[in-house]
Amino acid sequence: MVALDVLGRRGALRVLWELRGESLTFRALQDASEMNPASLNTRLKELRALSIVEHTVSGYALTEHGAALMAALAPLQQWADRWAPALGATS
């Protein structure tokens, strides 16, 4: 339940989405996620405490657990890709 609570917080999934490829510096992550610095710092602190995100020499990156979480969320993305057009929206 802790993980779902954190993932449900504003911007948490966006941070994970932006880190799905390569590591990003704080500034690059802030620009990509369109979050204010205080909110981004709070989300990163929470995600780091859960070992989902780590800070490396090249910036922030998903940990092994974070990558596994993104893989677990992939079916949800596939569902959203099929569902959104029915609403006239984009995923």
Image (tube, rainbow, N blue to C red):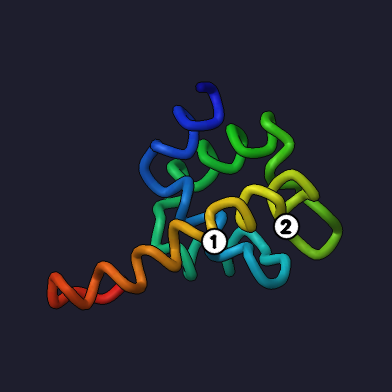
Q: CA distance from mark 1 to mark 2?
A: 18 Å
Report crowding for label 1: few under 14, some 14 to 19, many 20 or more residues within 10 A (C-alpha).
Answer: few
In the rendering, which numbered label is found on residue 2? none
The residue located at (61%, 55%) in the rendering is 70
Q: Which residue is mark 1?
A: 74
The residue located at (48%, 69%) in the rendering is 32
Q: Residue 89 placed where, x, y %?
A: 19, 74
Give the amino acid type for the residue marked by disc 1 in the picture: Ala
Q: Quadrant of residue 77?
A: bottom left
Lateral position of residue 61 relative to residue 35, left or right: right
Quadrant location of the C terminus in the rendered image: bottom left
- Of helix, strand and loop, which one carries label 2? strand
Q: Which residue is mark 2?
A: 61
Lateral position of residue 20 relative to residue 12, left or right: right
Report crowding for label 2: few under 14, some 14 to 19, many 20 or more residues within 10 A (C-alpha).
Answer: many
Q: Residue 55 placed where, x, y %?
A: 77, 49
Give the amino acid type for the residue marked by disc 2 in the picture: Ala
The residue located at (56%, 55%) in the rendering is 16
